[in-house]
Amino acid sequence: MIPIIYLLTMSIILTSITIVLSKQVLNFHIRLQDLIAFIFIKLTNKKYMEKKQNKVKIYIHQYKWTSALYELDKELKEKTIHKNLQQINYSIGFILENTNYTNIANKYYKSINKQKHN
C-alpha cells in the first residue's frame, strides 16, 4: 500500500513540474520569435537608412545639390520622429550654404540648436 501512495504522490509532483516547465519552454519560444522579428525589422530599417545616407553623401560629393536636397527633404517627410533629425537639418543647411542661401541655412542651423536644448 505504501509504495502505491509513494508512486502516486511522485507522479503528481513530477506531472506538475513537467507542466510548468513545458509552459516556460513555450513562453521562451514565443518571446524568442518576437525578438527575432524585432531584430529583423531593426536591421532592415538600419540598412535602408544607411543606403539613403550613402545616396545623399554621393549627391553632395558630386555637387548635385538639388538631388541631395530632394532626398533629405523626402527623408524628413517620411518620419516626423527621426533619430538623425539633427544630421539631416545640418546637411540641408550645409547644402543651402554652399548654394549661397545663407539665410535659409542659418534657420536650419538654429533648428539644430533648438533640438539639442529640448
Image (tube, rainbow, N blue to C red):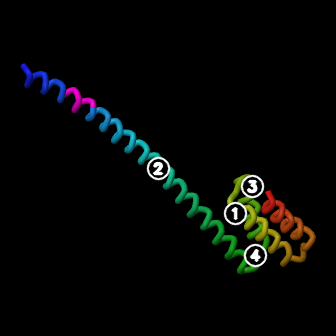
Q: Residue at x 23, y 30 (%)?
A: 13
State left or right for residue 85 relative to residue 105: left
State left or right for residue 117 relative to residue 16: right
Q: Mark 1 touching mark 2, by CB under 8 A?
A: no
Closer to the observer: label 3 or label 4?
3
Quadrant of the snapshot with the C terminus = bottom right
Circle 2 Cα neighbour tier, 10 Å, few/some/many (<14 / 14–19 / ≥20): few
Q: Earlier in the sequence, mark 3 or mark 4?
A: 4
Element marked by disc 3: helix
Most extreme residue toward the front is: 2
Task: Please name the residue that numbered disc 1 is placed on.
Answer: 84
Q: Earlier in the sequence, mark 3 or mark 1?
A: 3
The disc at residue 35 is 2
Q: Mark 3 touching mark 4, by CB under 8 A?
A: no
Q: CA distance from mark 1 to mark 4?
A: 21 Å
**For residue 3, which quarter of the picture?**
top left
Q: Residue at x 74, y 58 (%)?
A: 76
Query: As shown in the figure, which amino acid type bears the numbered disc 3?
Result: Lys
Q: Is residue 68 magenta?
A: no
Q: Magenta residues?
A: 11-16
State left or right for residue 55 relative to residue 12: right
Task: Please name the residue that numbered disc 4 is placed on.
Answer: 64
Quadrant of the snapshot with the N terminus = top left
Task: Give x and y (percent) for residue 65.
Answer: 78, 73
Q: Residue at x 71, y 60 (%)?
A: 75
Task: Give x and y (percent) for residue 60.
Answer: 73, 76
Q: Residue at x 32, y 34 (%)?
A: 20
Q: Earlier in the sequence, mark 1 or mark 4?
A: 4
Q: CA distance from mark 3 to mark 1?
A: 13 Å
Element marked by disc 1: loop
By secondary structure, the bulk of the magenta-drawn segment is best described as helix
Q: Earlier in the sequence, mark 4 or mark 2?
A: 2
